[in-house]
Image: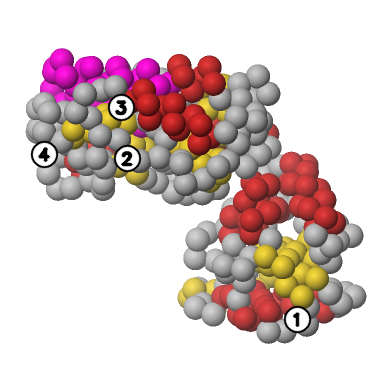
Amino acid sequence: MPQNPLLDISPPHCRERQARLLQAMQEKRLDLVILTRIEHVQWLCGPRFNWHHEPAAAIFADGHTLLVAPNKPPPVAAADEILVYEANSTSTLRNDQREKSSTVLVQAIRSRPAAQRVGIEYSCCSRHMMGHLQAIYVDVEPTLYHLRRIKHADELARLKHAIAATGAMYLRAREIVHPGVNELEVFNELQAAAVRACGEMLTGTGNDYASGQHGGPPRDRAIQAGELYILDLGPAYRGYFADNARVIAVGGSPTTRQTAAWQTVADVFPLIESAVKPGVRAREIYRRAQHHIAQFPGGVWRSHLGHGIGLFPHEAPHLNPNWDDTFQAGEVIAVEPAVYADEELRQGIRLENNYLVTEQGVELLSDFPLGL
């Protein structure tokens, strides 16, 4: 089967994102936006650079887009102008890459009419950049995170590919998880399954591989019969993170209490699938799930219900009482109800599905077995 072309860089979809940012720039009366966060550069221009590089990008109010790339121009990018900076010197990675890329970008900006109002990411735009431009600076990070909530077709394709990799990981987990297996072995086997499913090296990985625990990294430890093994997996494909969870009863014989806890948690998903749609408040969905889970006697649940996923493992919308987001069509969300009771349940149950929010409701993207 030929590979989905949307998994590669899609300049038309990048241009759509640029158009959305340009509209926001017009509303904020910005002459220029400078981007230095690596995921924002990818979102705008397409290429996924390695974490140890410091690319930059800029978009002017007239739509001209500039990319500053490490060492050489990428083969494909949605940019009108591509410049390079020296990221390696005789094969050695430089430690002053931000200064190098900023110098190139500032020189290019200065070759155009002076920008009076400049949008920057307040959390990471360096003095290398700001110290050489005389302008009024405006924080555009909230705008960028808001725009990133709506996934374009190329982003959705990558997310679906990463989510499918978790399906392969859970399939392998059900083959190898048994009393006595080492958690590190489970981790290694599941990483290999994800790499095979993705067809290339992962660009990120997570989350929980500790048996008999609420979560945590794998340990040099043999898992034990009777434990509940929460596998919360988050492989990233070309920058885009999946995030879902399944639970395996080690030894294959869950107790009546463990099965009842699993059923309580699993029953949250029909609630999500019937209630979530554009305009619904995420905080209200959290409260409804919280009320349902509270019916399980002796159980505890104090975590969030979920979050958006994309170029970062946790994005908006937040299914969390500390935010008051409303759902929008085009978002991809991870929903993760749970119930914990350390002694009785050998820690507890957490299940997590990924959904696309549509105009009609939600579409399940992680359609693989939930059972213990």
User: Label 3, on which residue?
Assistant: 294
Q: Is residue 73 above or below residue 46?
A: below
Describe the element under mark 2 as helix, strand or loop: loop
Write down the region rendered in magenta. Answer: 243-269
Q: Mark 1 is on which residue type?
A: Leu
* Residue lying at 72% horizontally and 68% vertically, measured from the top left: 138
Quarter containing the N terminus:
top right
**Foreground disc of the pair 4, 1:** 1
Q: Mark 2 is on which residue type?
A: Arg
Where residue 328 appears, as percent x and y from the top left, is 65, 34
In this rendered view, identify the residue nearer to me: 5 or 156.
Answer: 156
User: Label 1, on which residue?
Assistant: 133
- Mark 2 or mark 1: which comes first in sequence? 1
**Foreground disc of the pair 2, 4:** 2
In this rendered view, identify the residue nearer to me: 134 or 12.
Answer: 134
Describe the element under mark 1 as helix, strand or loop: loop
Where residue 210 appears, as percent x and y from the top left, is 22, 41
Which mark, by number, is residue 222? Answer: 4
Q: Is residue 98 above or below residue 26?
A: below
* Residue lying at 78% horizontally and 43% vertically, measured from the top left: 16
In this rendering, would 116 be left or right of 306?
Answer: right
User: Label 2, on which residue?
Assistant: 302
- Mark 3 or mark 2: which comes first in sequence? 3
Residue 338 falls in which quadrant of the image?
A: top left
Q: Mark 3 is on which residue type?
A: Ala
